[in-house]
Amino acid sequence: MSKPRKRPQTPHDPAVQRKADEMISRLREYHRLGLECNLLPTRKERREFADQHAISQTTIRKVRALAREYTSTELDELCRLRKPDRMPFHFGYIPYFLCCHGKKERQKLQRQAAENGWTAPEVHVAIRQMRGGRRGGGGRPMKKPATAEAGLVRITADGHLWVRRCELVLTAFKTGKPDGDLRDYAEEAVLALRAVEKTARSATKELEAMLGPRSGR
């Protein structure tokens, strides 16, 4: 038995309007909370603020970015936009919109996303295409190497790149004590590096096991 089809959503559908209003209300509430949180001078106060409002530390950083990058007028413009299904943008779109280089590019992307009915992941794809297929963090979408040799060569090259990148970043990082947002980013970097370390250790063991005992040359 096939599943019943969803009712077509029309501009006059009360259910659609109600859901749209809820999404807009949530977006405006996040913007308001972000403005409040950005006024707090210490990291401890900002963490407590997030806890009081049951917002994770990852989300509160996005909320603060929303408030920092969108004026009230710009938020109004965003909230007025509608996709073909008559729905506005939810908060999940915001991190992608904030990847844009400047407000003009962001506003253009928002209009395109509304006109084409893009999902948040599709907005991400559009941004990567705008960057010539590259993501903000650098590099093309990862593909399976054509050969094992090619994959090992890439691991070696990327490994040297990561070593150099860490050296450069840490040298600049040592110039001052991390505080506020910088400390938050540093903590995220620590988590990422731990994940890299764990994977690298596991991969090293597997490769060493495959190589077997060293033989003299």
Image (cartoon, rainbow, N blue to C red):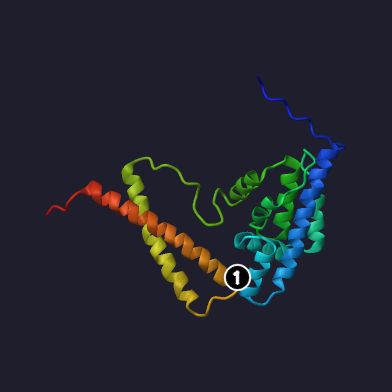
Q: Does residue 16 appear in this view?
A: yes
What secondary structure is marked by label 1? Answer: helix
Does 84 sit above or below residue 27? above
Per the image, the residue denoted by label 1 is 181
Horizontally, residue 31 falls left or right of residue 131, namely: right
The percent position of residue 14, horizontal first and vertical second, equals: 86, 39
Residue 217 sits in quarter = bottom left
Tell me the residue at 66%/58% (across/down): 98
Tell me the residue at 47%/60% (across/down): 192
Horizontally, residue 205 falls left or right of residue 21, namely: left
Tell me the residue at 76%/54% (across/down): 26
Q: What residue type is labelled 1?
A: Asp
Foreground: 2 or 166?
2
Task: Name, please, the residue furthest toward the left.
Answer: 216
Horizontally, residue 214 falls left or right of residue 70, namely: left
Q: Does residue 217 appear in this view?
A: no
Q: How many marks?
A: 1
